[in-house]
Image: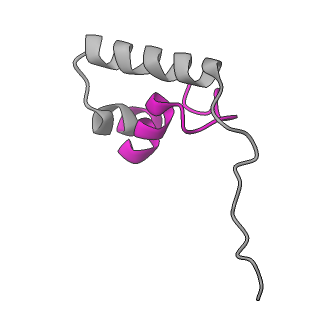
Amino acid sequence: MKKAKRKISPRSASAVDRYIGARMRERRRELEMSQADLGKELGVTFQQIQKYEKGHQPGQRSAPL
């Protein structure tokens, strides 16, 4: 019987990714913007903003900035 292969992320979220995400969320809230509004401004979906804010998009630090 073959073992199922698990997909492993090439790099997990680092402390830097989590810090950047937290700062993004803090600033977005200061500006009273929704994730959808910020996503429109940056040209990404609100789901992508959620991932950035939670630090689940490692290696994408410069993409939305």
x and y percentages locating residue 46 in the rendered image? 36, 43
Does 58 sit above or below residue 16?
below
Residue at 36% of width from left, 39% of height from top?
40
Q: Depth check: 31 or 4 in front?
A: 4
Most distant residue in the front direction: 1
Residue at 44% of width from left, 18% of height from top?
22
> Taking the image as drawn, is residue 13 in sight?
yes
Residue at 46% of width from left, 32% of height from top?
54
Which quarter of the picture shows residue 16? top right
x and y percentages locating residue 49 in the rendered image? 43, 36
Task: Assess whether residue 50 is covered by the magenta stretch.
Answer: yes
Q: Report the quarter where the C terminus lies.
A: top right
Which quarter of the picture shows residue 15? top right
Q: The magenta stretch spans which residues?
A: 40-65
Most distant residue in the left direction: 32
Q: Depth check: 55 or 37 in front?
A: 55
> Taking the image as drawn, is residue 43 in sight?
no
